[in-house]
Structure formats: C-alpha cells, structure tokens
Amino acid sequence: MGFSPGGGGFEPCSDQSEPAGEEIWSCPPCFKPLPLPSPPGIHLPISRRFSCTCSAVVYRESSSLSSSSVAQRPAVILPGLGNNTGDYEKLALTLQGYGVSTVVANVSRIDWLRNAAGLVDPNYWRGTLQPRPVLDWYLNRVDEAVNEALKQSQGGSLSIIGHSAGGWLARVYMEEFTNANISLLLTLGSPLQPPPKGLPGVIDQTRGLLDYVEKNCKKAVYTPELRYVCIAGRYIQGSRFFGNSNSPTTIPIAIEQSVPEVAIGNNPSTLTPTDATFRTRFVGQGYKQVCGQADVWGDGVVPEISAHLEGALNISLDGVYHSPVGSDDESRPWYGSPGVVDQWVHHLLN
C-alpha cells in the first residue's frame, strides 16, 4: 500500500518461483547483482566516527549444537515487511549454533495485506498515520513470540532482533505493548529515522509512521540495563538520477553518537560505482525516498545513515545486502549470513 520502507528487497528474476520479500511499501527492488567476489573475513576495528494457533516458530538449543555450557539469553526475531517466518530459519539455526535459542514471530507474506486497512484512515492521506491500530496484528504476533521466549528465559532477560521494519516496530512494541525484561534491541538494516520533509521528489512512504516512532518512543540508549545496537550494510552506493555522484553528499555518513565508538567492517568487495549506471541510479532513487539523498551508501534498500540511531552503538558492515530473499552467502551475503552473523553475534552472548 505504499507506507514504510524496510523489508524484503524482492527483485524480479525468472528463476525465482515466488516474488517474495518485496518491500511492499514502495521500496524499489534491486536488480541482479554485479559479480561480487566472496568477501574476506570481516574484521571490526573500532574507530571514532561522528557523523495458526502456533504463535511463533521456536528454535531451541540442542546439546549437540551448544557451543557453551552457559545458557544465553533467548532472542526474538522480528521479520521485515514483506518477509515471512521461514526467511529467518537459517539465521535461527546459525544462532542456535552459538547457544542462542530463538523464537521467530509468526508472519506470512499474505499477512502484510492487512496493512491496506490504513488506506481508510484519513491520517494516511495527511501523512500523520500512527502504527496502531493498523499494525496491531503484527504487534500481537510479536507479543506471542516474546511470551514464548520468556518461558525459555527462566526469569532472565531477552534480546530482540529486528530486521528492516521489524527494528522500528520493535521500538513501538517496547514502548506500548510490554514490560518484559528486554535487555538488547539489535536492528539489522532498519529504517529508523523519518525521511526529511520538504525535499523535491521525496514522498514520505511511511505516511507518518516513522515520525510517530521518533516523537513517541524512548530514545536509543546503550546502558548495562538496555542496549541498542544498530547495524547498517554498505553493499552499494547509489547515484543521482541526473548528473554524477562524484561531488560530496550533503548528508553525513553517520550522526553524532552519545556512544562515540562505531564499528566499521572493512570489505574491499563493496560495490563502488565510478560511473553512474542504471542500477546505481535505480538504487539511489530508493535511498532518496528514505533519507532524502540518492548518492549515499546503503544495503541496496535502506541507506546507511537511516539505519543508525543517536545514542545507540552503531555499526556499519561493508558488503552486506539487505534481505535474505535474493541473498547468497558467498557473493551477496545479507545480515543473517553465517559469516556476517559472526561479526555481531557477540552482542547476544552473556
């Protein structure tokens, strides 16, 4: 229906049987990737940088997979818009190998059609739409998954992993839905900031949803009690539709952090366009709708700057694609590919 970026990142492909994971709220698809060599091991030097009756699918740690005798906090995985529970099965199994049991919120692709209810809300057309009641169906699924994870936590705390729009929906859930003991919110390629207003050619695809989140949800923190960790991908740099993108962008790469250490993954395989192509222009127009600028870095769907929050520990990983749909662990890894998970999983471990 046209609101809220951040989701599946479907790209048309003749060999893809299901057009799954499309960011159904106007996020542009990405085309077939340019050949990308298998990324080397990503090291994270720290540098200062300012700038059903079944409610969920449960993946429990088994003794054969446990890598530690210490029980880790269970994690709840929140799917991005247009994605379904099954898209995160491999991620859940990967985390299981680290001793982290997971519960994936029970969401099907057809469920996202419920969002069409927002079209009858006058606030949609005014650009002042609120998450509730339009997204109550999703928040209820999150609540069911959290309650299941609480049974596993045995009175301990939980981690929430929000992919794409699941990241900002987690903030709504934590603000309005629960008093559960959540000690970590880790977002993966989530559009966390509202698009700028008043720029030519930029339409707020969220129809006010991210404005609401920014104004009504608690600010990000990084404390012993609650940690926000926001991870952005630098897979491809967009370019302007007209002209070149060699001049410096007017948008800073990262906002100033109250936690000034930002981890940056260095990967020379990241796609840097020396000359604008149809693909980089197409991706750039998607970036522009999210952050107001086309010639910025991002994961192919969400710009890097939009996936970071002031007050959080913000991390950028080179060569990381947005979606599990259309990804490849070798040539186009996404946030949940095993080699990438290895770079952020330590935040989940006690």
Image (tube, rainbow, N blue to C red):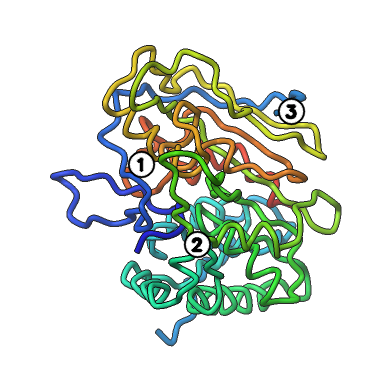
The reply to whether the C-beta atoms of the residues labelled 2 and 1 are less than 8 Å apart is no
Q: Earlier in the sequence, mark 1 or mark 3?
A: 3
Q: Residue at x 50, y 66 (%)?
A: 104
Residue 284, given in percent of the width and then of the height, sits at 40, 32
Residue 285, given in percent of the width and then of the height, sits at 38, 36
Q: Image height check: is 169 above or below 221?
A: below
Secondary structure, mark 3, is loop
Left or right? Give the position of 308 relative to 277: right
Q: Which disc number belongs to residue 327?
A: 1
Q: Where, by quadrant of the figure, is residue 326 drawn?
A: top left
Query: In front here: 278 or 197?
Result: 197
Tag 2: residue type?
Gly
Q: Image height check: is 96 above or below 154?
A: above
- Which residue of the protein is positioned furthest toward the bottom in this rendering? 53
Q: Image height check: is 272 above or below 194?
A: above
Residue for badge 2: 127
Alpha carbon separation for disc pair 1 and 3: 30 Å
Tag 3: residue type?
Phe
Secondary structure, mark 1, is loop
Label 1 vs label 3, nearer the camera = 3
